[in-house]
Amino acid sequence: MAFLPLPHIDTTLKEIEYVFDTLKADGVATYTNYGDKWIGDTYFDPVMEELNRRRAVVFTHPISADCCKGLLPNVGDGTVEWQTDTTRAIANVLFNGAATRYPNVRFIFSHGGGTMPYLVERFEAAARNPRMAQYFPQGFAGAAGKLFYDTAWTSNKVAMTALKQVVPLSQIVLGTDYPARAIGDHVKGLAECGVYSAAELDKVERENALALFPRFRA
């Protein structure tokens, strides 16, 4: 996968052409935000239009936004804020209509969707607002269930139970956050968390990703 040079729109469009047509990349990656704009913002529409045309897989990873760096003196941004920023990005993609406008883009959100599973009751209520009806014909669960979520830093019983309750098993893929964590930590966590059967683990650790990247079946 290739990391896109956002927020520079024209440069990013050239990079998309290069990485897909020349490098034959399997997908691209972005941050959840770029200063004061989150993925899903209409500012990024030209890029999203091209990614939609290419039916691209787009992996996102959180980073501290301008608003929210170093908020707690003894707690690093990666402990709380990055999970929250993943949630902001998911909310913006869904509630700002990007997921509806660009249905061919297959988003993967890291870290089990951030705090989204825990906040699902609030998101469900917001999705019932008549102004949001066009984006949520199947409710919040229907929209959230079309995104993908990796298991990095969430391969524990509490997080996996919540995520599995909110989205279909088909949308959960193995993530490791390597090199921030050892790959084996997450494999061990998933195996021991007690949330997945052996058949379900096979889907999370292999089959679901192969649906996104079918050339690796060979």
Image (cartoon, helix red, strand yellow):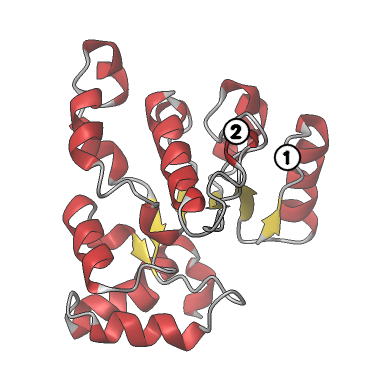
- Asked which secondary structure carries label 1, the reply is loop
Alpha carbon of mark 2 to alpha carbon of mark 1: how far?
18 Å
**Residue where numbered disc 1 is placed:** 6
Identify the residue at horizontal 51%, vertical 81% (top origin).
218
Classify residue 130 as left or right of residue 144: left
- Asked which secondary structure carries label 2, the reply is helix
* Closer mark to the observer between disc 2 and disc 1: 2
Measuring from the top left, give residue 52's x and y in whole percent.
55, 37
| Disc marking residue 67 | 2
Extreme residue in the front direction: 73
Identify the residue at horizontal 38%, vertical 31% (top origin).
94
Classify residue 154 as left or right of residue 177: left
Q: Indicate the amino acid at tag 1.
A: Leu
Classify residue 199 as left or right of residue 208: left
Measuring from the top left, give residue 198's x and y in whole percent.
20, 85
Measuring from the top left, give residue 65's x and y in whole percent.
61, 39
Q: Camera-side residue: 16 or 95?
A: 95
Q: Indicate the amino acid at tag 2.
A: Cys
The answer to which quarter of the image holds residue 66 is top right
The answer to which quarter of the image holds residue 140 is top left
Identify the residue at horizontal 49%, vertical 49% (top origin).
81
Query: Of the residues under marks 2 and 1, which one precedes in the sequence?
Result: 1
